[in-house]
Image (cartoon, rainbow, N blue to C red):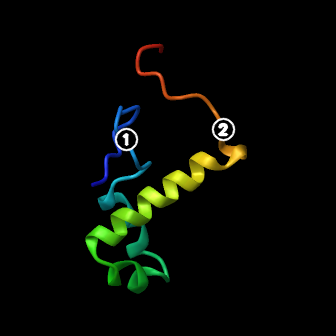
Amino acid sequence: MIDATIAGENANSYVTLAFADAYFADTLEARKWFAFSLDDRGRALVSATRKIDMEPRFCGVPYDTVTP
């Protein structure tokens, strides 16, 4: 299950499935994306998030919801 809550303790994706569906709907890859099941699309988002998190050039600090 996708949890795209900003700074969420259990967040596992940077985007929701609805956001990804809307994004891919307007691309040449739309048929490929929508051919996958909902579960597989969710797994793809979690996998992509993990890859981004492991990429050194995207290192930063966690989002802080308290400090303005």
Q: Quadrant of residue 11?
A: top left
Of 40 and 5, nearer the camera is 40
Q: Position of residue 46 (x, y in %)?
A: 42, 56
Query: How many residues crowd around disc 1 within 10 Å: few (fewer than 14), some, or many (20 or more)?
Result: some
Mark 2 or mark 1, earlier in chain? 1
> Looking at numbered disc 2 in the image, what kind of residue is underneath it?
Cys
Residue receiving disc 1: 11
- The disc placed on residue 22 is none
Q: Secondary structure at mark 1?
A: loop
Instruction: Give the residue drawn at x 66%, y 38%.
Output: 59
Which amino acid type is marked by label 1?
Answer: Ala
Instruction: List the residue tagged with mark 2.
Output: 59
Image position, residue 4 (x, y; %): 35, 45
Q: Position of residue 7 (x, y in %)?
A: 41, 31
- Note whether 27 is above or below 57 in the view shown: below
- The CA distance from mark 2 to mark 1 is 17 Å
| Above or below, comparing residue 38 to residue 56 in the picture | below
